Image (cartoon, rainbow, N blue to C red):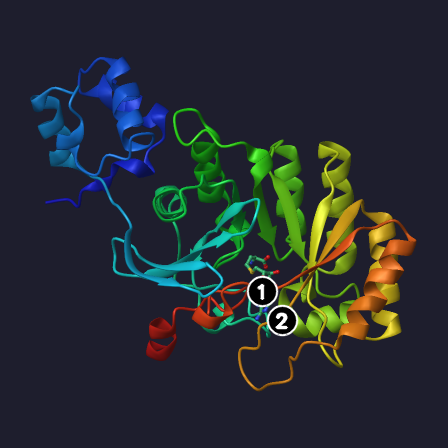
Amino acid sequence: MTEKRDIRALTKEEIRAYFIEIGEKPFRAQQVYEWLWKKGAQRFDDMTNISLSLREKLAAVFVINHIRVDEMQRSSDGTIKNAVRLHDGKVVESVLIPTEKRITACVSSQVGCSLDCTFCATARLKRMRNLNADEIYDQVVAIKNEAESIYNRPLTNIVFMGMGEPLMNYKNVLEAIEKITSPEGLGMSPKRITLSTVGLAKLIKKLADDAVKFNLAVSLHSARDEVRDRIMPINLKNPLKDLLEALQYWYDKTRRKVTFEYVVWHNINDKAEDIQALVAFCKRVPSKVNLIEYNPIDEGEFQQARPEALDAYITALDEIGVVARVRHSRGKDIDAACGQLANKNELLAT
Ligand code: SAH
């Protein structure tokens, strides 16, 4: 017997084509699609306006894969971390971050990561596979439900800052966003979604060409190749001049500022020349800067720089009119903060 396919890996058009092929009315495809996405049906039998015979036909050929939240940890600051089990047993993590004004979902796009950023815990897991669009979408739905049931508040924002590099899983990430924003899915505004990338130049241009409506963040961390090469090996193949050009292209096409994520580390990027390099970079790309607090992952060379170093960055950026804000970590006590998502059990197994 051939293995059943995950019906949620099909686009609406593909479902429609399949229905035509088996002699069903195409409008039924629309109904099934809404059950799968908007209504979150977990079994074909939940689809009450679909005939029993069609439900049986579908169940014979397809499965509906669903994520399962295996474990939910709650931090003293209200942050919630979900350990999410996928249909094949792999685990990723996603995080609910409540602030006064927002509830943000931070979601994963890959199991593990292939990029080897030397300061990041996820990099210690090799990349195992890309997530499907439905696995990304389901993480958002799980957090939306938690926001409503635990905090009695709506989910307001989504960031792709969990495990993995979203642009290395381009198609599925864009499909998930399409479903999150579509009225047939969650109907959220793309303005409330931010994709965070290590900065793959070619794919940033592709985002611009694809006229995406969500926000872009780039994990810059240094505007000097000799430093960035060392902490983010992807920079060797994808140097700052290519990144700069891609970001200018992004701005020309979208007219939206990019947000740079930037950690300042002691003795790595806390010198005047590092600050000057970032200032020069920001002068050439309309941007904002988020100075992220570092979450140590071991006793190694990466340690948060002193507050004076951050102040020096903020003053220099302010002089050229670039807004820079310090972002404090949330959920540190449950290893839910930036760069800590690694799922300790998987890490021990590798
Ligand atoms: N691959 C994507 C998204 C995942 S990482 C990207 O690179 O943007 C989300 C953010 O956390 C990135 O800016 C990353 O550089 C940062 N980060 C990684 N490890 C960290 C740590 N230990 N402390 C603080 N930020 C970290």
Q: Quadrant of ligand 1?
A: bottom right
Of marks 1 and 2, which one's residue comes earlier in the chain? 2
Q: Is mark 2 within 8 Å of ligand 1?
A: yes
Q: Is residue 295 left or right of residue 125?
A: right
Q: Is residue 127 left or right of residue 89?
A: right
Extreme-bottom residue of the structure: 299
Q: Is residue 276 left or right of residue 157?
A: right
Pointer 2 residue: 294
Label 2: few (<14), some or many (≥20) within 10 Å? many
Type of amino acid under label 1: Ser
Q: Work out whether residue 243 or residue 45 is closer to the camera in this orientation and state it.
A: 45
Q: Is residue 207 above or below residue 105?
A: above
> Which residue is rendered at x = 26% and y = 46% of the image?
66
> Which residue is rendered at x = 39% and y = 51% of the image?
131
**Looking at the image, how many numbered discs can be counted on the residues?**
2
> Gap in Å between the C-alphas at discs 1 and 2?
8 Å
Quadrant in the picture for residue 126: bottom left
Q: Tell me residue 256's x, y (percent).
A: 72, 37
Q: Tell me residue 70's x, y (percent).
A: 27, 60
Type of amino acid under label 2: Tyr
Q: Is residue 52 above or below residue 245?
A: above
Q: Is mark 1 within 8 Å of ligand 1?
A: yes
Instruction: Locate the N terminus and report the quarter of the image it occupies.
Output: top left
Q: Work out whether residue 113 or residue 40 is closer to the camera in this orientation and state it.
A: 40
Pointer 1 residue: 329
Q: Tell me residue 310's x, y (percent).
A: 78, 68
Instruction: Locate the C terminus and report the quarter of the image it occupies.
Output: bottom left
> Which residue is rendered at x = 76% and y = 81% of the image?
267
